[in-house]
Image (cartoon, rainbow, N blue to C red):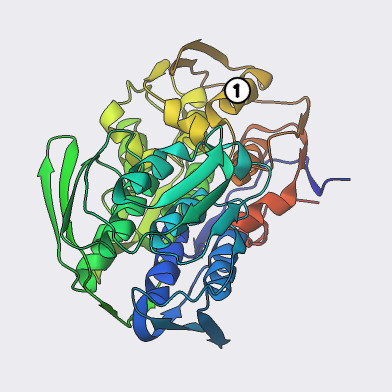
Amino acid sequence: MPSEITIKNKISPFNKNIKVSSDKSLSIRCVLLASIAIGNSRLSNLLESEDVKSSLKIINKLGINFKKKKNIYEIEGFGLNGYNTKKEITINAGNSGTVGRLILGLCVKSKNKIKLIGDKSLSKRDFSRVTEPLKLFGANLKSKKNLLPVEILGNRFLRPINYLENKGSAQCKSTVILAALQTPGITKIKAKKSRNHTELLLKYLKIPIKINSNGEYDLIEVKGLNEIKSFDYHVPGDISSAAFFIVLTLLSKKSKIIIKKVNVNETRIGIIKILNKMNSKIILKNKKNYKGEKIADIHVKSIKSFKPINCPSKLNSSAIDEFLIIFLVAAKANGISHFKNLKELNKKESPRLNYAIKFLKMIGVKIDRKKDNIKIYGNPELSLNGNYLINNFLKDHRVFMMACTAALVFGGNWKIQDKDSINTSFPKYIDILKTLGAKIK
């Protein structure tokens, strides 16, 4: 029987300060870069979710030791050629596309065959978007139908490449960057703008990387074969986790929240820009720069009336993990909201665009779809009193949290399955909801 929660009551007004889980994207990247650094790196406030645990298990299987003391993970790296695989091995990325794709970029020099596998959800996702550019470097990769499992056998004589990334995928871009670190010469990447944590980390680590903006694209040059020194890093809060509490507050009555010390990297705050266009007044305070990343406290108040939006496609990549929760606001807006070019939503842990449409229709929201474009017909009076069951969504943590938010702000009697899905990114999600007064069984 799947793990299940029940929500029967709307959340009462609240006024709280909270902290959300640490940034998943940064946690994974810090683990992977520490694994190829020279010496002991110290990572504090690392997200202890299933996805990050997958990254730790993988580097350990590749010969890298780590230990935890209190809230600090120490990872002992041996440099760019430090992975020690004396025989063929299998590594498991679990549910994480970030871990699965990025680790392939670090295995382009593997001396023995490495087989990458994942869970049922990850095994349905396209890996050709990273295997094809890695083949251009000279690595040997095999898979059936571009799906997991993927086998990789490295090449000592890699060559730099010129690569166009036109999907707005930070995973694809980062995989190529990590492979370029181990390649002689200069790799050039023209990448549609997407989250830039990998680039900022490498700048902080003083690796030769040049980034120039050209409209919707970044032009990136990476000079390979420069060793990374060990480093210390404190991981800030995750905007993708904060998003659910931002929208919960906006849609609740007479409520306020302050979410402390969240990473507000410009490539991640599409949700704030979109919601503020819809009449929200989300404010960032106590802004600080931390090793290239921007950190701030997010202040949110509930809103009585939302404007519809014709969402600019240029904001898609900076809100790609938050669209499900944005759609709930559009469902409450006074008018028709338009969202375009959302095909990347169906490339995530589940076909999220398909699930979002099914979900919105289930709660009585009118929605039109034409290929990857949708119109959401908002209803400011949206209120629910029926029975709702959420299941069969490939255990997608963001679908689960979307359903919890809808139950707490719109009402109704809800049973939401696969509670354990939140362990991939936000294990403390329900605990924090309860501190705000949510009644969850």
User: Which residue occupies the extreme right position in the image?
Assistant: 1
Looking at the image, residue 139 sits to the left or right of residue 207; the answer is right
Characterize the local packing of mark 1: few (<14), some (14-19) or many (20 or more) Cα atoms within 10 angstroms.
some
The quarter in which the N terminus is drawn is top right
Mark 1 = which residue? 360
Q: Report the side of 131 relative to 310 (left or right).
A: right
Residue in the picture at 31% in, 45% down = 136
> In the structure shown, which secondary structural element does the residue marked by tag 1 occupy?
helix
Give coordinates of residue 252: x percent, y percent. Answer: 55, 41
Question: Which is nearer the eye, 369 or 375?
Answer: 369
**Quarter holding residue 131:** top left
Residue type, label 1: Leu
Q: Where is residue 30 in the image (x, y as percent from the top left)?
A: 40, 69
Q: Nearer the viewer, residue 280 or 204?
A: 204
Q: Which of 349 and 263 is in front in this view?
A: 349
Q: In this view, does 431 lie above or below 357?
A: below
Q: Can residue 159 be seen in this view?
A: yes
Residue 417 in the image: above or below residue 167: below
Residue lying at 40% horizontally and 44% vertically, measured from the top left: 130
Q: Residue at x 33, y 51 (%)?
A: 138
Number of numbered discs present? 1
Closer-to-camera residue (88/330): 88
Residue at coordinates 47% horizontally, 59% vertically from top-left? 24
State the image quarter where residue 214 is shown.
Answer: top left
